Image (cartoon, rainbow, N blue to C red):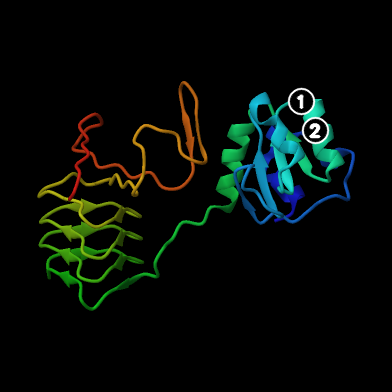
Amino acid sequence: MKFSEILRQFGDAATNHSLTSNPDQDPEITGVAAIDEASNGTISYVEGAKFGSFVGKTNASALILPQDEKLQMVAQERGIVWIASSEPRLLFAKAIALFYQPYRPTPEIHPTAVIHSTAKVGSDVYIGPHAVIQQGVEIGNGAIIHPNVVVYPDAKIGDRNHLTRQLYHPRNAPASVQIVSFTVGAVIGAEGFGCCSYPDWLVQNGTIWLHSLRRWGRSWLQQWD
């Protein structure tokens, strides 16, 4: 994706940028990276003076910078295109969303999956090896049931939900069961890469899965050995 296309996607959030003075410098951007790990073709960001020195040594091709003319000048002298923003982190979160491609298996029902004759399965559903779908279960369109998942009787799984191994789905669960899934090493409550929080809202890239019993505030986490 050309840098100019990223600017177009950002719209009014990216009106101060290097193409204004150097319209011919429009590199191809292929991904995002932390500024200390960035390579040619990636876009990164700097937030605050603490990380300002990285502008002089990063390998990124594009940077999202604070409204700091000195940093903008350093980037320009190094041939790095830039966007200036009062919220660099927020804009970077939006950049991640332009490149993020979550894994999605091809829809199919694996021959080793066990599906009760009374279960209802929507369209474009993936059900992986050794999954068990018990009686009365309803699975919405585009759902992904990963290998070894057991969905217990009469649970209703909403459209486009992802169910991963070792999750418990109780009998007569509500119609739009949502799943919380945390990867190994996740820190609950911490802000991950591409997460940008504000007092009243949150920008988060990737998939957030929630397991709720009937109402918000009655969710739980359980460690599986």
Q: Quadrant of residue 63?
A: top right
- Left or right: residue 48 versus residue 19 is left
Image point 60% across, 33% down: which residue? Answer: 89
Q: Position of residue 135 (x, y in %)?
A: 10, 62
Q: Left or right: where does residue 105 sit relative to residue 15?
A: left
Location of residue 156 in the rendering, given as x and y in whole percent from the top left corner: 20, 52
Q: Quadrant of the N terminus?
A: bottom right
Instruction: Give the CA separation, mark 1 to mark 2.
Output: 6 Å
Above or below, 1 relative to 8: below
Q: Residue furthest top?
A: 199
User: Relative to 19, is 201 on the left or the right?
Assistant: left
Instruction: Please tell me the numbered disc located at residue 199.
Output: none
Instruction: Characterize the local packing of mark 1: few (<14), some (14-19) or many (20 or more) Cα atoms within 10 angstroms.
Output: some
Q: Which residue is mark 2?
A: 72
Is the residue 160 above or below the residue 36 in the image? below
Q: List x then y, in percent, for residue 180.
A: 29, 44
- Residue on which disc 1 sits: 68
Foreground: 54 or 80? 54
Identity of the residue furthest to the bottom in this view? 111
Q: Please, what secondary structure does the residue beneath circle 1 have?
A: loop
Above-or-below relation of 86 to 21? above
Which image quadrant is residue 218 in?
A: top left
Tag 1–tag 2 contact (CB < 8 Å):
yes
